[in-house]
Amino acid sequence: MTFGLTLTGLCADPPLTLAGARPGDALLLTRPIGSGTLLAAEMQLKARGRDVAAALSIMGLSQAAPARALVRAGATAMTDVTGFGLAGHLMNLCDASGVGADLSLDAVPLYAGAEALAAAGLRSTLWPENHAALVGRIHGLPDGGMKSPRAALLFDPQTAGGLLAAVPQAHADRTRAALVEGGHHAARIGVVTEHAGAIRVV
């Protein structure tokens, strides 16, 4: 089954886009990554049911409250993480804003079970294309993202992925804490740098 949806309307306020991130801004992510790997494994009957159920419960949460919280925190740029994976959407944000990013690999939240499945070599069908398009632009990536399962998940296409936002440092920790208190899996995963178009994994 295929379902398509188009939404049109008017924006009452200036839109928050990919452009606008500034060096020094913190990067906040409101949801774990790894849903593409989990769902690919589920189609092969290789994922644990409790991991899939846990991911679906998170994926079903509304993003309205996190979006409002990020706007109140003064977010300078924001996008949702979908088919291009975290690496792809972060690169799009950097390119649009004329900035770079330092990404803390250990700080990126993962869905339960996703890292083990990635370690077993399970990938979404979109993973090779995402990896090929981006690996040359990401510095410090362990083994080019081929052997490190956590690094591999940076290229994992997401279904119902989280929001990725650049937020002024002064408001980042308080905003992340408020999101977590509200039941969201928010994490501070890096910082915006002045090195335009370059993502460095640290």
Image (cartoon, helix red, strand yellow):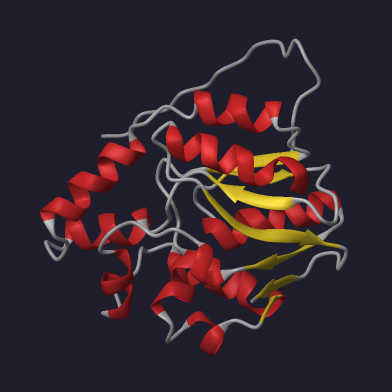
Please indicate whether residue 94 sits to the left or right of residue 184 in the image: right
128, above or below 143, in the image? above
x%, y% of residue 40? 27, 60
184, above or below 90, in the image? above
Residue 168 visible in image: no
Q: Which residue occupies 17% across, 62% down?
A: 47
Q: Which residue occupies 23% across, 46% down?
A: 54
x%, y% of residue 115? 33, 70
x%, y% of residue 127? 44, 67
Looking at the rendered image, the quarter that the C terminus falls into is bottom right
69, above or below 175, in the image? above
In terms of image quadrants, where is residue 59? top left
Q: Which residue occupies 33% across, 33% down?
A: 60
In terms of image quadrants, where is residue 69? top right
117, above or below 89, in the image? below
Looking at the rendered image, the quarter that the N terminus falls into is top left
x%, y% of residue 124? 36, 63
In terms of image quadrants, where is residue 125? bottom left
Q: How many marks?
A: 0
Residue 113 visible in image: yes
